[in-house]
Amino acid sequence: MMRPIAVAAVVASVFAASEPDLVYDFEWRVTASVSRVERGEVHTVQAERKGTARLGLRHERDGVLAFDWSGPEGTGSGVVGPGGPEHVTFPLPAEVGLPPLPPYRGVGQFTFEGAREHPTAFTVTWVEAFRCRTAPRACDDITAWERAFAGIARRVKREM
């Protein structure tokens, strides 16, 4: 039988692992477009979404950083490996909708000021795109889409 102190220590360590190591003010912007064939013509819809949020940065394993952000205009998250961003999620403008993801992920960049593990500020970008390489009907009448994310984080003096 586990003693209450041991159970409390295990629970505390699980919750402590999910807490951010550093806290940032975050400004973000998403641009997106989708081109669809409608009544035999290609129509393109472009839109933008932006906001501010509070971002928490955590150190994971072997040089991997993870971040989550939340604000009144939306939420998102990302993982940055030693070679740069590996995945970023972010809100999309409703006007563009959510076309299906391509079989590959996106590509991004992570630049920072200060030490990589404890940056005083950083910028993260991420782009996903799709171009239909066959008849549009085979791609649900979508000829192309693109979504791009850019965010700037500045460390807050206090920590969560």
Image (spheres, rainbow, N blue to C red):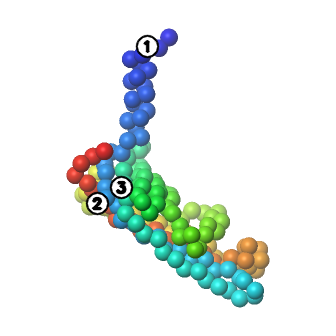
First in sequence, mark 3 or 2: give its number: 3
Q: Is residue 160 above or below residue 81?
A: above
**Would residue 63 appear left or right of 44 to someone viewing this image?**
left
Q: Amino acid at mark 2?
A: Arg
Mark 1 — residue?
A: 3
In the rendered structure, the answer to whether residue 113 lies left or right of residue 136 reads left
Q: Front-most of 67 and 51?
A: 51
Q: Is residue 56 above or below residue 131?
A: above
Classify mark 2: helix, strand or loop.
strand
Secondary-structure class at tag 3: strand
Disc 1 packing (10 Å; few <14; some 14–19; many ≥20) = few
Q: Residue at x 37, y 54 (%)?
A: 55
At label 1, the amino acid type is Arg
Which residue is at the far left? 157
Q: Which residue is mark 2?
A: 154
Q: Quadrant of residue 42?
A: bottom right
Residue at horizontal 31 percent and vertical 45 percent from the top: 160
Q: Earlier in the sequence, mark 1 or mark 3?
A: 1
Q: Residues within 10 Å of mark 3 (few under 14, many from 20)?
A: some
In the picture, measured across the screen, residue 27 lies left or right of residue 35, that is left
Asked if the residue at tag 2 contacts the one at tag 3, i.e. Cβ–Cβ closer than 8 Å, the answer is no
The residue positioned 72% from the left and 83% from the top of the image is: 38
Residue 76: x and y in percent read: 47, 57
Amino acid carrying label 3: it is Arg
Report, in whole angstroms, how far the alpha carbon at label 2 lies from the one at label 1.
43 Å
Quarter-of-image position of residue 16: top left
Label 3: which residue?
54
